[in-house]
Image (tube, rainbow, N blue to C red):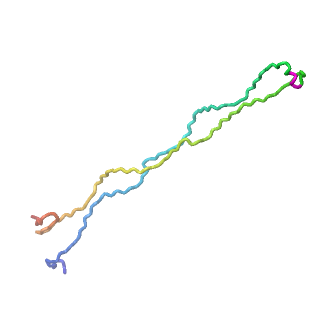
Amino acid sequence: MPPAQQSENHVSNDVLYLHAEELRAHREADVTEEVIIQVRVVTEKRMIEVDVRREELVVERRPIVSGAAAQVGDNTVVAGKTVTILLHEEDIRIQKVPVVIEEIHVTKRRVEEMRTFTETVRREEAVVDTIGDMDVVMPGETATPSGR
């Protein structure tokens, strides 16, 4: 049937969708800070004490009791007799050896904090205009003839 000839008992249901903007958060990882950890070499003077061993010559002169001289081998006096004794001393060489003195552990941890963001959003509202003497019922309102 053409629209002008519809009966009063026939109800037409048309749907009009209204839209609104909602706020939704999307996360993106941005580099905000950069931390550089460097190792630098510090030079300082250090001292080490070491016991150094060396030999010293001790010369003792003891008189010989008479009669004991006869027991000592050759009694001939000879010019130019020499005895050579070698004395030793330790030579110390200092060696630098690297050793671990400290560990540095570097980790990152995730920290969450609540932040509030404000944006202006829009939404659609239905505006009902009538032509003629028609009752319009809106949810939450009583029927009122429009135009009066």
Residue 112: x and y in percent read: 37, 51
What is the magenta segment's predominant secondary structure?
Answer: helix
Looking at the image, residue 47 sits to the left or right of residue 133; the answer is: right
Residue occupying the point 25% across, 65% down: 18
Using the rendered view, name the quadrant where residue 26 is placed.
Answer: bottom left
Residue 23: x and y in percent read: 31, 57
Q: Nearer the viewer, residue 14 or 108?
A: 108
Question: Is residue 41 part of the magenta span, yes or no?
Answer: no
Vertical order, 3 against 123 (above or below): below
Q: Nearer the viewer, residue 66 or 45?
A: 66
Vertical order, 140 against 80 (above or below): below
Q: Nearer the viewer, residue 116 or 102?
A: 102
Image quadrant in which the C terminus is located = bottom left
Residue occupying the point 86% across, 24% down: 72
Question: Is residue 70 part of the magenta span, yes or no?
Answer: yes
Residue 48: x and y in percent read: 61, 32
Looking at the rendering, the stretch of residues picked out in magenta corresponds to 69-73
| The residue positioned farthest toward the bottom in the image shown | 1
Residue occupying the point 83% across, 26% down: 83
Looking at the image, residue 27 sits to the left or right of residue 67; the answer is: left
Looking at the image, residue 31 sits to the left or right of residue 61; the answer is: left
